[in-house]
Each structure stands twice: as C-alpha cells, then as structure tokens.
Amino acid sequence: AQSVTQLDSHVSVSEGTPVLLRCNYSSSYSPSLFWYVQHPNKGLQLLLKYTSAATLVKGINGFEAEFKKSETSFHLTKPSAHMSDAAEYFCVVFMGGSYIPTFGRGTSLIVHP
Amino acid sequence: DAGVTQSPTHLIKTRGQQVTLRCSPKSGHDTVSWYQQALGQGPQFIFQYYEEEERQRGNFPDRFSGHQFPNYSSELNVNALLLGDSALYLCASSSLGQGRANTEAFFGQGTRLTVV
C-alpha cells in the first residue's frame, strides 16, 4: 500500500524568509510525486511534479522540491516567502503506474508580514 | 478556456436524500476523477471515468456512483446521504488515454455539500 505523510500541519514564516514543507512517502514501487496548492475557496493547482527524471524539480512561483529516494522524501522549498504563498499545500503520490492518487493531509502555510 | 467547472457551488441536503453533482472537464481532456475532501483533510479519491466507464475506484461505498457522458462531462451521485458525507467534492480532469497514468490533473473549485 502507498501512503504519504506531511510532517507539519501548520508552518509559519515571515515574508522574505525561506519555506520548507516536508513530505515523506512509503512505496514498494517507483513513485510519481506531486505538490498541489489550494487557496481558500479555490481548486487545487499543480506546483510541480516528479516522474523519475531529474531529482530536483522546479515548479511555479519559485517553488522547488528534491526527490530523495534514500530518505523517501519529497520536501517542498522556496527561498523567500511572499504573502500570496499563504495557502494549503498537499503532497500527492502515485505508485508505479497506479491511477489512484494518495493525498497527504495538507500543510497550512502562514506568512507573516 | 473555462477550465474545470463544477455545479452547484454549494448545496444543502437532508439525511437520506440523494444528490447529483456535475463537472465539465477542461477542453481537450477525456478523463474525469472525483474526490471527497472533508474539513481539515486531504482529498480522498472516489473514482475515475474514462470513455464513459468507471476505470478505477477508491474505498467508497456503492452509495457513491457516477457517470460520464459522450462529451466527457461527468456526474457524481450519492444516495441515502449521511451526515458524514458533508464535504467539499472536487472534480479533476486530465488527458490520460491508455497507459498515461500520472499526468497533470486540473481541479475545479468544488461543490460544498452540507448534509443536515
């Protein structure tokens, strides 16, 4: 069975400081990994995806994530937070060609002025 | 391009009733997936439709059923509503075809269902 764990339910940062949102997965097969963002009253938007190409993946709005197989992690980072980054972030995993995604419970990013 | 559109945006139903939610996929997409997102939780996969057939199903009871039409739009039906069915229901569309499992999915804004 596949699973994904987002290690923090809330992350609070000041504007202009780095962002780190942590995600770990369990898998018996090669996974495909995604990060989605959900702003209040809006649908989910894809930030970036890893599908067995480069392990460092660059996404939209300055976000990037690194796939580390040895640590079974896919943490999301951004060098400098912006107020508009405040939202809910979801790590998603598909295992080995599966059509069924598993979502993490989400991390709420709070950005202080 | 209107993206993925869902209707209605909000809905209030009584326990035991039936509800139908609708989704129009992004132009050019042929696959529709439905998710249930309870408050404070991540979305849970309900099922996926391709070529008017249910291709994959998550761990949801038979009270949850769906349909896909020839124009790729889709409906989610829930019978015998329970209080626990209160959630945000999200529709996502993608262009999967055969063997392309993990391409980007575009999500609608969801339908907020409240069961009282």
Image: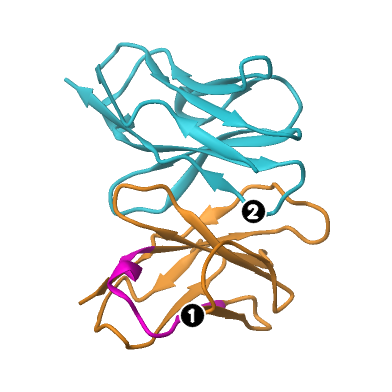
Chain colours: A cyan, B orange
Q: Amino acid at mark 2?
A: Ile
Residue farthest to the left, as pictured: A113
**Residue type highlighted by circle 1:** Arg
Residue B27 seen by the camera:
no
Vertical placement of A58 versus B56: above or below? above
Q: Which residues are magenta?
A: B74-88
Q: Chain of mark 1?
A: B
Give neighbour class at mark 2: few <14, some 14-19, many 20+ (Cα, 10 Å): many
Q: Residue at the spot x=54%, y=26% of the render?
A: A24
> Could you say which is closer to the camera, residue A4 or residue B113?
A4
Would residue B87 be counted in the magenta stretch? yes
Where does the C terminus of chain B fall, quadrant-wise? bottom left
- Residue assigned mark 2: A100
Identified at 62% across, 22% down, the residue is: A72
Q: Chain of mark 2?
A: A
Choose between A42 and B1: the one closer to the eye. Answer: A42
Residue B85 on the magenta span: yes
| Residue at which label 1 appears | B63
- Identify the residue at the far bottom of this view: B17
Tell me if residue A75 comes above or below residue B110 in the rendering.
above
Q: Which sits in the foreground, A67 or B27?
A: A67
Cβ–Cβ below 8 Å for labels 2 and 1?
A: no
